[in-house]
Image: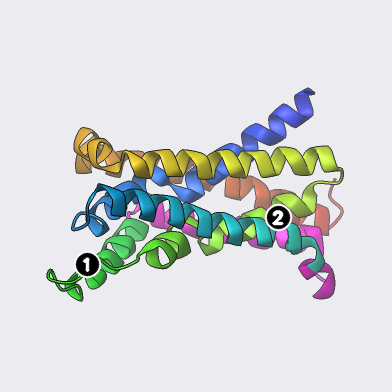
Amino acid sequence: MSAELISLFTATFVTFFVLIDAPGVAPIFASLTAQGDAAYRRRMAFKSTFVASIIMFAFAFGGAWLLGAMHISIDAFRAAGGALLFLIALDMVFEKRTERREHRAEELLEGHDDDTEPDDISVFPIGIPMIAGPGSIATAMFYMSQATIWTEKAVVLSAIGLNLLLTLVIFLAAGPIVRLMGASVAGALTRILGVILAALSVQLLIDGIKGAFGLG
């Protein structure tokens, strides 16, 4: 594999690792599945990642066609994606994103009756928007639209797929991981990932503006 492909894989993997934020979603997943048995938790882990995979790969493959149909240039999409990711990064640094996730989880748990079968939370809120959120969907479209040859597209898809596989593994081990990390460690990790995402988003925004105005 060439240095360019390795660099593309690294950038794509890190970006999606930060966007999906599986360690940050794991406590929410653990709380939402706490009332079910082990089989239920495994089923929700597999089903939620499967749903998210379908959504993200669908947008990854259909993104270029969608941009062309809407007459949107790559540079404009790059700049918009950078701005969107920066807003997400701010939410992560100031823990607004975590608060919204916990609020969704609390609402779902409040409406749950202990005497009934646990709800299917694989599609909402785990599959969408906690794994396949607006940021990760837009970024999948962006990276695939930038890839000019099938080798590059394969690298992007493999980086996305590896992140989704990692998310599945973390969900399957969510209980022990949450107990090991604790709330303070999870919060610190989310903030660190937010700073990394902020730097990546600013670079995307700069590249988009430079490309749009022909600044080299």
- Label 1, residues with CA under 10 Å away: few <14, some 14-19, many ≥20: some
Instruction: Report the residue at 55% width, 45% height from top.
Output: 16
Q: Which mark is residue 151?
A: none
Front-most of residues 42 and 27: 42
Front-most of residues 29 and 21: 29
Colour option used: rainbow
Residue at numbered disc 1:
106
Q: Are marks 1 and 2 in contact (CB under 8 Å)?
A: no
Do we see residue 191 in this rendering? no
Whether residue 17 appears in magenta in the rendering, the answer is no
212 sits to left or right of 22: right
Front-most of residues 32 and 35: 35
Report x, y in % for residue 175.
Answer: 24, 42
Report x, y in % for residue 120.
Answer: 34, 66
Q: Which mark is residue 142?
A: 2
Relative vertical location of residue 132 with respect to residue 196 in this rendering, above or below = below
Image quarter for residue 209? bottom right
Name the dominant secondary structure of the magenta segment: helix
Quadrant where the C terminus is found in the figure = top right
Q: Which region of the structure is painted magenta?
A: 66-95
What's the residue type where badge 2 is placed? Phe
What's the residue type where badge 1 is placed? Glu
Instruction: Report the residue at 66% width, 63% height from top.
Output: 80
Instruction: Report the residue at 69% width, 50% height from top.
Output: 206
